[in-house]
Image (spheres, rainbow, N blue to C red):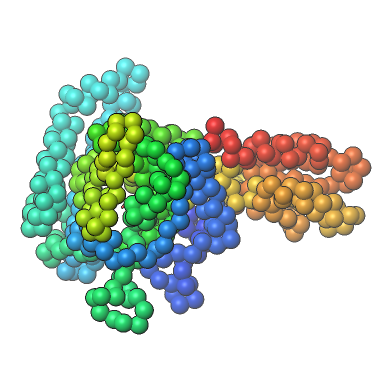
Amino acid sequence: MQKEDNLKDIISHAKEYGFVFPSSEIYDGLSATYDYGQLGAELKNNIKSYWWKSMVQMHENILGIDSAIFMHPTTWKASGHVDAFNDPLIDNKDSKKRYRADVLIEEHIEKIRSKIDKDVKKGIKRFGDTFDKEQFLATNPNVLRNQAKINDIEQRMRETLGKENLEGVYNLIMDLDISCPISGTKNWTEVRQFNLMFSTELGSVSGDASKIYLRPETAQGIFVNYLNVQKTGRMKIPFGIAQIGKAFRNEIVARQFIFRMREFEQMEMQFFVRPGEEMKWYDYWKEQRIKWHKKLGLGEQNYRFHDHIKLAHYANAAADIEFNFPMGFKELEGIHSRTDFDLKQHEAHSGKKLQYFDPEINENYVPYVVETSIGLDRMFLAVLSSSFKNEDLGDGKTRAVLSIPPALAPYKVAVMPLTKKDGLPEKAREIMNTLKLNHNCAFDEKDSPGKRYRRQDAIGTPYCVMVDHQTMEDETVTIRDRDTMEQDRVKISELANIIDGKVSMTNLLT
Ligand code: GAP
């Protein structure tokens, strides 16, 4: 299946089963805005819980907060977002489509990189086990030529984008012969900067004095509270502050389902460290975060690191954890060494000291910060897209299944009476009433057992429990495993343990 078709199938599956709906659909929707339905909200909450537990609950030196979306407008002047939170945009005059100039160039680089990957694959096919990838990459003339092209483009990106030389960015697009994917022409406008913050007015007075912004990142709510938390939580450096919350960006190109939206959710953690120790912690958090992802079992081959060429205005080092989405490898999470930029800026703009007294070295200093920042919606898409399968069961039969990691699945178990009579529904409810104290359960009594199993497979329920006539005699039920489709007869008294063994979040945290 083509990757784009795969994304289309995922979008329609997500809608059909109540995971994600287009926002305000009865008015034909609002571009790049989505609503999470009944199962989407559950999956989202479980992802949040996995993140919160592993970052806050599992680390004595990380505390969680929940700061306001609206902040004093000077926050955004201090953070640099008013002046520098821009994307370089370019329009194609024929298709009237607007693009991010840096993305057009990065996509061009990706095309060249995929040629290298193709050559490597050919080499593997030809030489099998004797193929030496390192040597091939270092000596093959095609690869070397393509790698030189990439190096040259990246160098020019650093010289232009990195220095806000917009004419240089335009020239680079023209030199690379990049055309509009819609019109196919190179009839481009000049490159302009576009600020991504949404603004609104506070109270009833309009004008600049009352202009406030919808936060474009949750991080600033952490920075302005760093001393409050440090003092009230009696924290010693190194320590972290975490939070989950909405962020808003007026994205130029907002598409690809929930990957890039104008309203989205972030899970961010700022780790405050002694100056000079930031690179040690930057490496530490890169390692910790990739472990967190891989623990989910979505496939180790689906992750890679990408070091930033164009650093954000606050960072001295930054890397993305990229995931193999249906659209290819794209950013899922960022790990940034933000230096003391934000705290120093807030000191300068607020006139308040934001220093920490370090008793171990007897010194006052403004801490350095290492940040981990993951988009909740992108994580949702990563889970959904890698779990979605149309399985061939032989004999012309297929099933759509979401093999969501059990700890994240919206329902952990569906309880089903075989028929609607002979006291089976009552018995099934009795079992469910016990299980639901610990797990989100579904009750499903309509249609044939086969149809019910398929329905639960399609929404990713790890277990189905069938209550039948034998249950009434010996207090046993059948339990069916989503992934193997195998059924076992077990005692009702063993159910809670069996289910817990598979779906507990503890499995991910240890
Ligand atoms: N505080 C740092 C920061 O905000 P970022 O790389 O701009 O860094 C962090 O954003 C994460 O937020 C990204 O890795 C991505 O997962 C998510 N994200 C950013 N823009 C998004 C958007 N428009 N829609 C959905 N998720 C987005």
Which residue lies at the image location 24% right of the left edge and 75% below the top edge? 208
Residue 221, image x, y percentages: 37, 56
Q: In the picture shown, does residue 496 fall above or below 361?
A: below
Q: In the picture shown, does residue 496 fall above or below 127?
A: below
Residue at the extreme top of the image, as rendered = 130
Can the viewer see residue 353? yes
Q: How many marks?
A: 0
Can the viewer see residue 256? no
Question: Which sits in the foreground, 101 or 321?
Answer: 321
Residue 83, image x, y percentages: 19, 61
Determine which quarter of the picture holds residue 509: top right
Question: Which sits in the foreground, 41 or 277?
Answer: 277
Determine which quarter of the picture holds residue 93: bottom left
Which residue lies at the image location 43% right of the left edge and 72% below the top edge? 29
Which residue lies at the image location 34% right of the left edge and 44% below the top edge? 371
User: Seen in the image, is 400 located left or right of residue 495?
Assistant: left
Residue 345, image x, y percentages: 23, 53
Determine which quarter of the picture holds residue 249: bottom left
Q: In the picture shown, does residue 310 fall above or below 87?
A: above
Which residue lies at the image location 65% right of the left edge and 53% below the top edge? 455
Residue 414, image x, y percentages: 70, 50
User: Seen in the image, is 168 located left or right of residue 326?
Assistant: left
Position of the C terminus, as image quadrant, is top right
User: Seen in the image, is 198 located left or right of residue 387?
Assistant: left
